[in-house]
Every structure is written in C-alpha cells, then in structure tokens.
Image (cartoon, grey):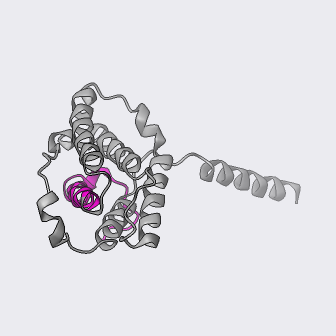
Amino acid sequence: MAIQTITWMSAFLCLVQVFSMPMPCQLQGQLVRTTHNLLRDMGGHFPLECLQENVFMAFPATSFATSGAPQVRAIYETLKNIDTLFGTDELPSMWDQPKLEYFQNIIYRQIEESECMSSVDTSDYPIRAEGLKTYFGNIAAVLKEKNFSYCAWEVVRKELLYTLEFILKHTSDSLLWSNRT
C-alpha cells in the first residue's frame, strides 16, 4: 500500500512539474486575427468625408522579411506601437466603444504574455526596428497634426488594418495557432 501511494504521489508531482513549466514565448495567431476583426468592425468602411484627410504611408514590409525570431519580434514591436497609439484619452467616440475596449485589452494581453520577445537577440533587428519606428512615427504624426480628429483616427485604423492583415497573410507561420482553420 505504501509503495502504491508513493508511486501515485510521484506521478502527481511529475505532472505538476510538467504543467507548471512556463509557456513558450510566442504570439497567438488567433488573438492577432481577433484584433484585426475588432478593428475592422468597430468603425465600418472608411468614411467618404475623410477621403481628403487620407494620406499614403509606406508600410515597412521589409521589417517582416525574415521568418523566425526576427519576424516574431517585429510583430511584437508592432503590437507595442499599436498599444502606444491607443494609449491616448482622445479616442474617437463614434467607434463601437465595447469593441474598442476589447481591442485594447487583447493588444495589451498579447504584449504582456509575450514580453520575453523584447529580449530576443537578432543581429539585424535594429534595421528592421528603424522601419517600424518610422512607420508608427508617421502614424502618430498624422494624429497629432490633425488634432486627434475622427478622420485622423480613421486613417490610423485603415493603416493598422493593413498592418494586421499583412501580419496574418505573410507571417502567420511565426504565430502560435491553437487550432488552424
């Protein structure tokens, strides 16, 4: 009886040890897809009254060019930049507020769960980071230049939709998918 108890206790302790190990540092593809869909659905189509405010911003596709750790770090940095943009109190009230809050929460969750990405060492990352920094700097400049107007936020939403769509189409192999559909 004592041997059986010790065996069960050992098995239990082994399982506890295995399941308490930290999860690998990866971004979840389903959450990236959810953020894209929320951003798409919170405001509808690009408003006609904002067409004159629309500006072209060159997307830094080269920041995502190499697969593996450099690509995942670029996605992580993109999410951090999105979080920074939405960190203002001057968000558009015309958007669906529950979807906006959910969007912000998921972005924050992805960043928190993948914070180890900031320590991923990639030799060419500074070059990639510069492209992202310029891109998101341009987006932030549009917001400030247009005093965080509704149309400025629509331009930002359009750009971020493109960014998230690009990530989902071209870098999805670097994301963690629980059940690929």
What percent of the width, then of the height, locates residue 84?
Answer: 40, 46
Q: Residue at x 25, y 46 (%)?
A: 145
- Residues in magenta, as a range: 152-181
Judge from the rendering whether residue 22 lies leftward or rightward of residue 3; answer left or right: left
Judge from the rendering whether residue 26 lies leftward or rightward of residue 161; answer left or right: right
Judge from the rendering whether residue 17 lies leftward or rightward of residue 41; answer left or right: right
Q: Pick the quarter of the image with the N terminus.
A: bottom right
The chief SS type of the magenta part is helix
Q: Residue at x 35, y 44 (%)?
A: 81
134 vs 178, nearest the viewer: 134
- Which of the 4 image quadrants contains residue 74? top left
Q: Residue at x 11, y 61 (%)?
A: 52
95 vs 70, nearest the viewer: 95
Question: Can residue 174 be found in the magenta stretch?
Answer: yes
99 vs 20, nearest the viewer: 99
Q: Residue at x 36, y 28 (%)?
A: 121
Question: Can residue 14 be found in the magenta stretch?
Answer: no
Which residue is most to the right? 2
What percent of the width, then of the height, locates residue 26?
Answer: 41, 48
- Vertically, is 124 above or below 37? above
What percent of the width, then of the height, locates residue 51?
Answer: 13, 64
What percent of the width, then of the height, locates residue 44?
Answer: 26, 74
- Vertically, is 49 above or below 26? below
